[in-house]
Image: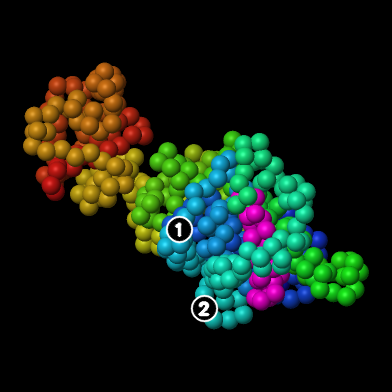
Amino acid sequence: MSHPTLLEELGWRGLLHLASDGLEQRIASGPISGYIGFDASATSLHVGHLLQVFLLTHLQRAGGRPVIVIGGGTGMIGDPSGKSSERKLLDDATIEANSRALGRQLERFLDFSAGPTQPRMLDNREWLTRMSVIDFLRDIGKHFTVPYMLAKDSVQGRLAAGMSFTEFSYQTLQAADFLHLHQHEGVDLQMGGADQWGNITAGLELIRRVQRHGDPAGDDAAAAEPTAFGLCSPLLLTREGQKMGKSERGAVFLDAGLTSPFEFYQYWINDDDALVIDHLRWLTTLGRDAIEEIAAEQSQRPEARHAQQALAFDLTARIHGHDEAERQVALAEAAFADAVSDPNVLASLHGALGGFEFGPEADAWTVLEVAIAGGAGSRGEARRLIAQGGLSINGQRIVDPTAAPPALIAGRYWWVALGKRRRAVGRRRGD
């Protein structure tokens, strides 16, 4: 049985939103090199980047060569696509540090062993910073008309509120990236999310114009078969149409120092029932049969959240390692239990749940004070919760707010269950 082509694979996964003319024929002619750029405007990729990262993964699995462009140069400006205000400009040292961090994260998704599909990782400062202003205007800028640039959605969405020339020029810089990669690295394909289509087509237009300008055939060359191509995926959106990638605590990053593995796992275990099967197609390399089997189980028993468990485990294992994913499964099961008695698990949950601490003063606490410290809110709310039988400490249901709390587990911890979903770990200070 033959392996699916890149477009066939992306098609059944629902990852193919738009593609330029001739791409199917180009892929059929032999392996293709394709790139995606990631601006180095932060120290970590976040959940919103994952869909584009998986485009590179599928490209490599289909026999293509992924090229990763870390936007050390363009990151100094920032892409206006999908933004309502201009980004803060970053200094060179920050861009350098961010570039290294993003490179390490992308290595988790691609096979960097030697071979024809070995990825290339480049920083566009290597070529953008070598051009003077005069060189850029002469070699790149002359190929863009102002009406063409104004027509881009990323520009139209910002004109009313105001847009600097710096951001207005971004599409020409990204187009210059594609031209350089096409000419010097043999890259024929640029990929990205649907909001990048305007920037991608700007690159296609620049390559076409440069080729026509340097060809004595003139306009006849414009009618020739294209040599560069674009492809974009859908955007990763919530049911409300907002970009995914945020939780109650802010953006969900791939860096464990910014988003803990517990928070990361919980983000996906709480994925929307209406979206989770699409996310399994988009954000894993699970095959069609496996995903269809999970979808059938999800349809029969949605309350079991089998699809969310599969997605959360797969992504956590890829980004934080298999052992960490196994640990998060155990923590997730414990996090909503009425009773947890293992001090090692409680120590982990204290950090994961943002638990509370107490000192000797807690020796005089009643269960009412423990409930408040555990997140019950006001004294009135805590009393109502206790009266309704909604409080347990160390697995003991308590209905008297004036009662003394149970003894500390291992002399250090209280496990506090507030209603069906809220849990907290109290830890004696200094332990």
- Asked where in the image residue 160 lies, by quadrant, the reply is top right
Residue at the location (38% across, 52% down)? 258
* Badge 2 vs badge 1, beta-carbon distance below 8 Å: no
Residue at the location (48% across, 43% down)? 246
**What secondary structure is the magenta-colored segment mainly?**
helix
Kindly report the distance in space between the C-alpha atoms of the residues bearing marks 2 and 1: 33 Å
Q: Label 1's element?
A: loop
The quadrant of the picture occupied by the N terminus is bottom right
Question: Would you place residue 18 above or below residue 404 in this image?
Answer: below
Which portion, as a residue range, is magenta?
167-192
Q: Amino acid at mark 1?
A: Asp
Magenta stretch encompasses residue 176: yes
Judging by the rendered image, the residue that carries numbered circle 2 is: 113
Which mark is in front, 2 or 1? 1
Q: Label 2's element?
A: loop
- Asked where in the image residue 115 lies, by quadrant, the reply is bottom right
Residue at the location (8% across, 37% down)? 360
Residue 102 at x, y percent in the picture? 47, 62
Q: Earlier in the sequence, mark 2 or mark 1?
A: 1
Give neighbour class at mark 1: few <14, some 14-19, many 20+ (Cα, 10 Å). few
Judging by the rendered image, the residue that carries numbered circle 1 is: 91
Decide if residue 333 is on the left or right side of residue 344: right
Residue 396 at x, y percent in the picture? 21, 33
Question: Would you place residue 81 above or below residue 5 in this image?
Answer: above
Give neighbour class at mark 2: few <14, some 14-19, many 20+ (Cα, 10 Å). few
Q: Amino acid at mark 2?
A: Ser
Residue at the location (57% across, 50% down)? 279
Residue 254 at x, y percent in the picture? 44, 55
